[in-house]
Amino acid sequence: MTSIPGGRPVPPLLVVEDDPQLGPLMLEVLGEDYAVTLVRDGDQGLEAARHGDFEAIVLDRRLPGMDGVGVVRELRRVGVATPVLLLTALGAVADRVDGLDAGADDYLVKPFDFLELAARLRALRRVHGEDEEVVYVGDWEFRPASRLINSPCEGRKVLTETEAQLLLLLAQHADETLSRERILRDVFPAGDSVGTVDTYVHYVRRKTERDIITTVRGRGYRLGQL
C-alpha cells in the first residue's frame, strides 16, 4: 500500500488502456481511491503486472502489441494471480468467455459507468482480500481458498487446485513428515503413482522456492521454513 498525504493507505492499481481520452480520465477518477499506474499497450502492461505489486488490474481487451486476452493468459501462465478486470467493447458472449477462460476475474463492456467500475473493483478486492484464512510458511502468505501465495520478495502467485491441496495438507500437518503414499491418497485421484507427488512438489517449488517444502530422505515431505 502507498499513502496519500493524510496518511490513508491507498491500494495500488494498474490500468492498461490505450484510448487517449479514456486512459487519462480513468487515471483522474480512479486516482481518488487508488494509486494508479497507467500504461498504454499490452507489452508495457505485461511488464508492469509481472514486476509490480498491484492489488488489481484494469485491462483493455484491444491494445497495441499484445492484446488483453494474451496479457492475462501470460500472467496466469507465469503464476501472477493479481485479479484482472477486463474491459471490452465486444459484447458477444464468446468474446467475454475468451477473456474469462484466459484467466480474467471479471469483465465490463464499454461504454461503462465509473460507479459500476468502482463497485466491481471493490468486489474483486473483497474476493481476493483479507477475509480469507491465511497460512504462513516462512515469509510466504498462503490463502488456500483462492489458491494465492505471496511473499515480499517474489510477489503474488497462483497455485493450481492440486498444488494448493498439496501445500494445504502439509500445512495442516506442519509438525509431521508425510509419506508420499499418504499425500497420494489424500490429494490425488485413485490410479495416480507416487511419482505424481514428486512432480507436484516440484511444481510448487518452481512457483515459490525450494525450501517451502522439505524432502525428508526415505520418509517423504514436510512443510519447510518453520
Image (spheres, rainbow, N blue to C red):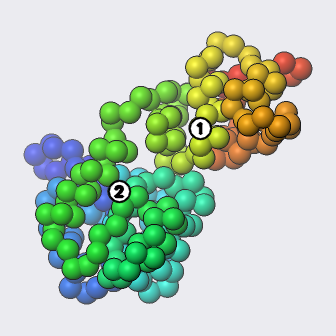
Q: Residue at x 75, y 26 (%)?
A: 185
Above/below status of 5 relative to 21: above
Q: Is residue 21 above or below residue 117?
A: below
- Specify the farthest residue to the top: 175
Residue occupying the point 60% across, 60% down: 77
Number of residue marks: 2
Q: Could you tell me residue 108's position as x and y percent?
A: 29, 69
**Mark 2 residue crowding within 10 angstroms, few (<14) / some (14–19) / many (20+):** many
- Identity of the residue drawn at 40% across and 83% down: 62
Disc 1, SS = helix
Image quadrant assignment for residue 161: top right
- Taking the image as shown, residue 43 lies to the left or right of residue 195, namely left
Q: Tell which residue pokes out farthest to the right in this image.
A: 218
| Closest to the observer, 213 or 86 | 86
Mark 2 or mark 1, earlier in chain:
2
Instruction: Please give the residue where the numbered disc 1 appears in the rendered image.
Output: 164
Task: State the separation of the CA atoms marked 2 and 1.
Answer: 22 Å
Which residue corresponds to the image point at 60% horizontal and 46% vertical from the top-left? 160
What residue is shown with label 2? Answer: 56
Mark 2 residue element: strand
Q: Are marks 2 and 1 in contact (CB under 8 Å)?
A: no
Note whether residue 205 is visible.
Answer: yes
Q: Is residue 144 above or below residue 173?
A: below
Residue 15 in percent (x, y) is at 32, 69
Examine the image and state in which quarter residue 165 appears. Answer: top right
Q: Picture coordinates of residue 91 (x, y %)? A: 33, 80
Q: Amino acid at mark 2?
A: Ala
- Residue 136 position within the rendered picture, expressed as x and y whole percent measured from the top left: 50, 27
